[in-house]
Image (cartoon, coloured by chain):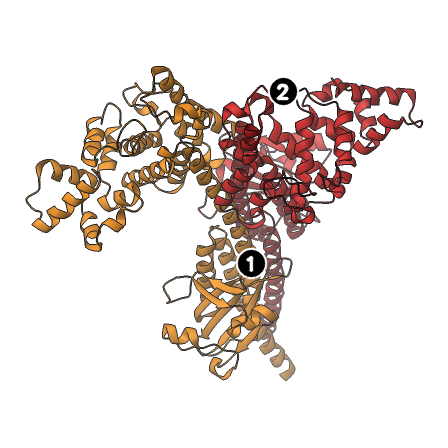
Chain colours: A orange, B red
Amino acid sequence: MVLKENHLKKLEAENRRLLKWEHQLSLILKFGQKISTTLKTGNLLQLIADKTRELLRAERCTLFLMDKEKKLLWSKVAHRMGGKRLEVAIDKGLAGYVATTGKVVNVRDAYADFRFNPEVDEKTNFRTKSVLCLPMKNYQGEIIGVFQVLNKKGGSFTRHDQDLLQIFSSQAAGAIENSQLYENLKESFDSFVWTLAATIDARDPMTAGHSQRVTEYSLTIAKQLGIGGEKLELLKYASILHDLGKIGVREAVLTNPERLSEQEYKHIQTHAALTRKILERANFQGYLEEIPQVAGSHHERVDGKGYPEKLKGEDILYLSRIMAIADVFDAITSKRHYRDAMPIRKALSLIKKDSGTHFDPVCVEGFMKTPLNKLIKIIKCNAEDYFKEEDLKLLSNYTTGQFLRILKKGNSSLTAEQRKTVTRFNYYYSR
Amino acid sequence: MVLKENHLKKLEAENRRLLKWEHQLSLILKFGQKISTTLKTGNLLQLIADKTRELLRAERCTLFLMDKEKKLLWSKVAHRMGGKRLEVAIDKGLAGYVATTGKVVNVRDAYADFRFNPEVDEKTNFRTKSVLCLPMKNYQGEIIGVFQVLNKKGGSFTRHDQDLLQIFSSQAAGAIENSQLYENLKESFDSFVWTLAATIDARDPMTAGHSQRVTEYSLTIAKQLGIGGEKLELLKYASILHDLGKIGVREAVLTNPERLSEQEYKHIQTHAALTRKILERANFQGYLEEIPQVAGSHHERVDGKGYPEKLKGEDILYLSRIMAIADVFDAITSKRHYRDAMPIRKALSLIKKDSGTHFDPVCVEGFMKTPLNKLIKIIKCNAEDYFKEEDLKLLSNYTTGQFLRILKKGNSSLTAEQRKTVTRFNYYYSR
């Protein structure tokens, strides 16, 4: 009878253990699903650290990644530390010990352990008590990072916690490695595209930086119009590459110091169609598929008088209509071989005047909503030096459109001081 | 007493259930870790299907992905079907029903179900009995594919099988979506790089196709030398982009129909350093980091008489030493404005003669080991049409080096017929 009683108790205990275990494995599976929703390493580090805290009921968690070349551990986030980048030498503290030895460290009282480095505690006004530090290994068994979990709520970390983290760590490692592969490729692609555009611009020193500025204007206008996500990324690439077709324009025409002859002008105009043709030969996938059309239509006009296809109104892609403004605005506010840069007041007036003929009125409105300080950042790289902190702050209160109205009609609500700043801004961009 | 007895039995049953469940959840976690080791959608489809069969103890599993635009379900693999691409209309069969309704189908006898499409069974000589068909949903709840699991070993699929597959499906969906994002970006990057190189080559019609052929020669030689994986990928990009610097060479010099003056030749030579300079401005990551150095050194010579840096021997990157042969071989076997293409025998002799001065002897050996049929595929795109099936088969038995020896010394072991083919090959490339 007693035996049976004991057996029953054992079974009940085992059942409770298994139920808890089942719950925790299900939680890890749920977390695993969640962490596969991002390929951004920074976000992933934060997400995994959050889920680890939840799983182990701990106060703080940092997931460090190993940079073997620079011999350091880095992380994008530490809880309650504001999410900035954190770096530790690869041989320092408990995390360093785990990174170099591959061993797990589980201590009740960090301050009693000689390997513990109290620096971070001091900096962040935190008191570390218990610590669970575990190496994150990839599928091949290489250490790629370190979990550092601090202060188990209501006690210290158990062997069971260690097992749980081990399982979660395996899931996390794959996600981290994939995100790094993706980000490496993305950065390679992005930087190559930027570099290439800059190289083509630089065939004529007068147009150096043009594609970059057009991209920044385009993105600023698009954001004012509520565009985000993949559409914004598409616009970015299409803008960077909008003048790719200039690869096929003869350098003699590109850098002609005189006003262009009609024939030369026709030759230069071929660049838009060529941009599209070259880009169409590539096989852009997913949300990048429309790069050729968006990039190739930046010289279309809503009144149908543009080129290469003389498209009208909404037959021109929305993103191309945005880019048209960006392209013209940069061209007229920049110096050319045969003319000076246009003063900003005149340039803004011209964009406004051509709303409905050259430009889509909705896009012009978006442009006119751009805060002045954003314009400054783009228009000339070193313009920020020319303005004092408080100038920039003031200018950020006015949109491009308001600025134009103030210049035209004056604005009695401005103080004398403010009027001076606005005038200085106008003057700066009229030289 | 009886109550207790019942309680005990219940507990034991519950215990068995939980243990089995724990085992299966652990299995799913293990599988989840495994599927995060590849970002290739094709491999992933195969892997997930394999693991599903294992998990549910089924005879066959196909994981279909949904192509909403083309209104079809496709898969790269079906077990025992040799792994080719499989397509089904989105509204056909059980899988189609699941894809369009989002419902789970679990049937004991497929042939008794009016929705079942027996076509695949007929084609593959298979007899479907039980079927479990379940939609694969992403984190946002959209259907992105369909699991089709066939013939549960020893019975039909249970509700428990359904639950297990549901959990595994959630893990799989994230992996699939990430692999598609990665592959989309990779294809966009690759095709853009190819397109760009082709565009730069085409500034001079005489060099059209040059970068592509150099890349194919480089990769062929590298494979003979045992190079694979990321090194091979690096060589691919560096080869495609090796003449990027020609962007900065004046078209008048590029297309000069006369022999170049010394000054013009100096100007053309700047392209190698410019290739490196432009590529260095990009921020290539991971295994792509060395693209600028590899690409920029393709005119170095092992004797130190090359350019731009007059590097010697092993100071030149191994991959650049391979590319040097590929570049020269394509240049001399192609027509130029001021000279004809060199006959193949002469071209091969020249490469061999310059081993140790211009070229690295090890790389020349790799080149000489290239099977002739591979050379044919690269040297002229339509050359294959010129040769009969059995010609190509014969040529595949000879390496480039053996071919050169036969041409020089004759080879008595060749039959008259074989000799004719080799002579024809030589003749074809000497016109």
Judging depth in this view, the residue of B219 and A7 nearest the camera is: B219
Judging depth in this view, the residue of A239 and B21 nearest the camera is: A239
Image height check: is B338 above or below B52? above
Crowding around mark 2 (Cα neighbors within 10 Å: few <14, some 14 to 19, many 20+) is few
Judging depth in this view, the residue of B27 and A165 nearest the camera is: A165
Label 2 near label 1: C-beta < 8 Å? no
Image height check: is B431 above or below B356? above
Crowding around mark 1 (Cα neighbors within 10 Å: few <14, some 14 to 19, many 20+) is many
Left or right relative to B286: residue A38: left
Q: In which quarter of the image is the N terminus of chain A?
A: bottom right
Quarter of the image holding residue A100?
bottom right
Q: Which residue is identified by label 1? A: A173
Image height check: is A205 above or below A91? above
Q: Element under label 1?
A: helix
Q: Which residue lies furthest to the top in this view?
A: A263
Residue type at mark 2 is Tyr
Closer mark to the observer between disc 1 and disc 2? 2
Q: Is residue A177 visible?
A: yes
Whether labels 1 and 2 belong to a single chain: the reply is no
Q: Quadrant of the C terminus of chain A?
A: top left
Q: Position of residue B288 (x, y in %)?
A: 57, 46
